[in-house]
Every structure is written in structure tokens, then in C-alpha cells.
Image (cartoon, rainbow, N blue to C red):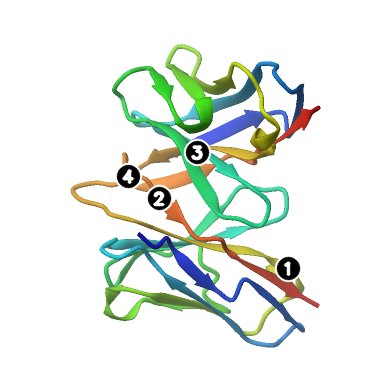
Amino acid sequence: EAGVVQSPRYKIIEKKQPVAFWCNPISGHNTLYWYRQNLGQGPELLIRYENEEAVDDSQLPKDRFSAERLKGVDSTLKIQPAELGDSAVYLCASSLVSGGLQSGEQFFGPGTRLTVL
Amino acid sequence: AQSVTQLGSHVSVSEGALVLLRCNYSSSVPPYLFWYVQYPNQGLQLLLKYTSAATLVKGINGFEAEFKKSETSFHLTKPSAHMSDAAEYFCAVNGNEKLTFGTGTRLTIIP
């Protein structure tokens, strides 16, 4: 079974440029997460989707970040314009949630390492 | 609100020695607790999880963790360290449909 796929693996851009990350979750997983992991820190949730619906985007900086999950499968996270402080690893995860999240295991992709110059 | 605190951002142990990585949690609801491992340039992989069944949880690669409610702890242990255990380890708590991670502990194995 294929795991969570993310692309690109690495991205280097200049500040004020736009950038997009793509994620394909494990087949059949209805819940998808985007996390940001700063250097030396644990991942922090940016947004969570249940099927096509963004059910928790409270930590997403909406002035420059946007995300979509069309058809409830793969997802795209965009930053426009990028700032120096956006340099981080962006992780995508997916899980199969039924009747509650608490015990659900999240499966993580390898991440996209973004460097903003 | 929930949170986890990992004591020690860096831990070094000799090959064959006991591994002990500490995690304390805070949660307003009965917690579900996880340990994840992250190897360089890779995503996070689940080691084990506590979901209110047995308090001693066994995971992959010989790791185990014990849930102690009175101490609000969920420490990760392995009896004998291997070189392949060198990685970053994250404790996480899941409450109110949100997974919150600690800041991680980098484990170094000394040959």
C-alpha cells in the first residue's frame, strides 16, 4: 500500500514569491492534515480536512496561506507571498476517522522542505 | 486544552544501554497519547499509542511506554539501544480532535 505522497520534496524560493505544495493521502483516508514543522520543533497543525470540508483552520495564517482539497482526495497548500519566516518543513498526514478522532493514527508523508531566501 | 512537555531536547546513550525518553502531558479530557519517531529527511512514523486500554503499551522496534495517570507521564523506554535508534522522537497528545506535539528529543547512540 502506498503511503502519503508529497511533492516537491525540496523548494527554494525568494521572498514574496508564491509556492505550492501537493499531497496525495493514503487511499480511502477521509481526513487530511497539513502541519508546519519549524527547525527543532514539533509539527503544528495548520489545517484539517474531513473529506472536502476544512473543519479546523484556526492556525492557518489566512492572509497569505490557502489550502484546498477538491473531491476530498488530494490537497494543495499555497503560500502567497512567501516570507522569510515561512522556511520550514510542511508535512501532510492522513487518517481514517470514523465516529471520532481520538484514537486514530495519523500517517505522515516525507514533507516538503521550504527555504525562503 | 492539551499539551505535552518532553524533558531533554538531546539524550545520548551508549549502544546496548537503556533508553529513557520523558514525556509529561496535560489534558482536560482523557488523553490519547502517542510516540512518533522521525528519521532525517523523513516524515513521522508511529512507534506506539495509548488509547485507554492497557497502561503498558508495546510498540515497534522494541520500544514501550507506560501511562501513569498519577504522574501525568508517558515515558518511552527501550531496554537496549541500537545504532539504528538514532532519530528524533516526538510525544503527542490527542484531545478534542487535535494532535498536539512536544518539541522533540534527539536521541544519539554512542558506539
Per the image, the residue denoted by label 4 is A104
Find residue B27 and report its horizontal and vertical position in percent: 43, 31
Per the image, the residue denoted by label 1 is A85
The amino acid on which the numbered mark 4 sits, given as a three-letter code, is: Gly
Q: Chain of mark 3?
A: B
Q: Are marks 1 and 3 on the same chain?
A: no
Query: Distance of mark 2 from mark 4, alpha carbons?
Result: 6 Å
Q: Quadrant of residue B109?
A: top right
Which is nearer the eye, A3 or B94? A3
Q: Are marks 2 and 4 in contact (CB under 8 Å)?
A: yes
Which is nearer the eye, A64 or B42? B42
Question: Residue at coordinates 59% horizontally, 76% vertically from top-left?
Answer: A8
Judged by depth in the image, the label closer to the viewer, 4 or 1, is 4
Crowding near pointer 1: few (<14 within 10 Å), some, many (20+)? few
Query: Distance of mark 4 from mark 3, alpha carbons?
Result: 12 Å
Q: Residue furthest top?
A: B70
Question: Residue at coordinates 70% horizontally, 18% vertically from top-left?
Answer: B16
The amino acid on which the numbered mark 2 sits, given as a three-letter code, is: Gln
On-image quarter of the N terminus of chain B? top left
Per the image, the residue denoted by label 2 is A106
The amino acid on which the numbered mark 3 sits, given as a three-letter code, is: Ala
Q: Chain of mark 1?
A: A
The amino acid on which the numbered mark 1 sits, given as a three-letter code, is: Gly
Per the image, the residue denoted by label 3 is B92
Find residue A61 and report its horizontal and vertical position in percent: 55, 70
Q: Secondary structure at mark 3?
A: strand
Crowding near pointer 2: few (<14 within 10 Å), some, many (20+)? many
Left or right: B4 as drawn, with respect to B82: left
- Point out the tag, 4 or 1, that comes first from the N-terminus: 1
Find residue B69 and report its horizontal and vertical position in percent: 42, 16
